[in-house]
Image (cartoon, helix red, strand yellow):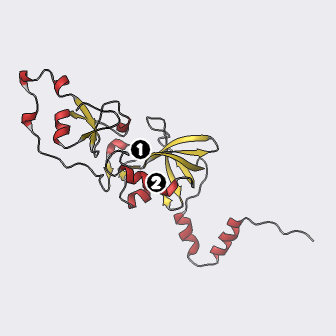
């Protein structure tokens, strides 16, 4: 007596779903097809909500979500975004879909979208108000849309607090340039790694007038 050919579980499920009117199209619309260059991986270490390390057959790879931006871990909302990503992905199997147009960012991280048991990680972060979507993922400089990150409120600029004319030793010494992000609550040195998503130069006095705090990592002038 010949053994019947084995049918994969996926094929059996597909056949069962096909018998239910209207069920198959909905399933196909929600679950992506993981074909090359997509790969299966496990998240092992998080830098912040949108950048982390995964382990796959090729080894350990540092990745960055290319379609959304989360606050830095030391900025307002940064720890919450990181916590959401941790709860959604850490030690779980995920599917990593590399971006076709921009394979890597300026820091050598693989630009990706990540499919989790809860859906696209970017969509999870957006729904929770922990990220902003890029207007054009291939051009991050085009700006962001969505719920803004928490930041310190703007304060009136105290012109008397700024050195001017000959009273100041020099602009560079008494009121140096520091760097901020669009929505961050801290100011940084130019070389600070927290500026990897973009830096805006302003004078130290203006940063203080806005209520911004010095970054604990790079320890800028105070």
Q: Is residue 100 above or below residue 19?
A: above
Name the residue: 38% across, 60% down.
Answer: 128
In the image, 76 versus 9, the foreground residue is 76
Q: Position of residue 170 (x, y in %)?
A: 15, 21
Q: Is residue 142 left or right of residue 205?
A: right
Distance Cα–Cα, label 2 vs label 1: 22 Å
Q: Residue 196 sits in which quadrant?
A: top left
Name the residue: 32% across, 49% down.
Answer: 144
Numbered tag placed on residue 206 in the rendering = none
Q: Is residue 62 visible?
A: yes
Ranked by sequence position, the earlier of labels 2 and 1 is 2
Name the residue: 29% across, 41% down.
Answer: 181
Say few, some or many: other residues with alpha carbon within 10 Å of mark 2 (under 14 / 14 to 19 / 20 or more): many
In the image, 100 versus 123, the foreground residue is 123
In the image, 195 versus 218, the foreground residue is 218
2 or 1: mark nearer the eye = 2
- Name the secondary structure under disc 2: helix
Q: Position of residue 52 (x, y in %)?
A: 49, 45
Q: Is residue 65 visible?
A: no
Kindly check if marks 2 and 1 are in contact, taking CB atoms under 8 A apart as contact.
no
- The residue indicated by pointer 2 is 85
Quadrant for the N terminus, please: bottom right
Q: Is residue 189 left or right of residue 193?
A: left
Q: Is residue 73 left or right of residue 112?
A: left
Name the residue: 19% across, 23% down.
Answer: 173
Q: Position of residue 175 (x, y in %)?
A: 17, 28
Say few, some or many: other residues with alpha carbon within 10 Å of mark 1 (under 14 / 14 to 19 / 20 or more): some
Numbered tag placed on residue 138 in the rendering = 1
- Name the secondary structure under disc 1: loop
Q: Is residue 205 above or below residue 121?
A: above
């Amino acid at each position: 007596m010949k053994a019947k050919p084995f049918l994969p579980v996926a094929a059996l499920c597909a056949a069962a779903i096909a018998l239910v009117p209207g069920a198959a199209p909905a399933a196909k619309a929600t679950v992506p097809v993981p074909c090359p260059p997509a790969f299966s991986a496990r998240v092992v270490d998080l830098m912040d909500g949108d950048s982390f390390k995964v382990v796959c057959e090729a080894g350990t790879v540092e990745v960055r979500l290319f379609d959304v931006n989360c606050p830095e871990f030391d900025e307002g909302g940064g720890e919450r975004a990181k916590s959401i990503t941790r709860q959604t992905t850490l030690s779980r199997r995920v599917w990593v879909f590399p971006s076709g147009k921009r394979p890597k960012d300026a820091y050598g991280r693989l630009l990706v979208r990540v499919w989790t048991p809860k859906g696209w990680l970017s969509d999870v972060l957006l729904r929770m108000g922990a990220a902003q979507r890029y207007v054009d993922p291939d051009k991050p400089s085009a700006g962001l849309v969505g719920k803004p990150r928490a930041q310190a409120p703007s304060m009136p600029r105290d012109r008397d607090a700024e050195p001017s004319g000959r009273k100041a030793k020099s602009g560079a010494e008494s009121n140096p340039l520091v760097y901020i992000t669009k929505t961050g609550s801290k100011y940084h040195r130019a070389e600070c790694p927290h500026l990897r998503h973009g830096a805006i130069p302003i004078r130290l006095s203006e940063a203080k007038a806005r209520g911004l705090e010095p970054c604990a990592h790079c320890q800028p002038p105070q």
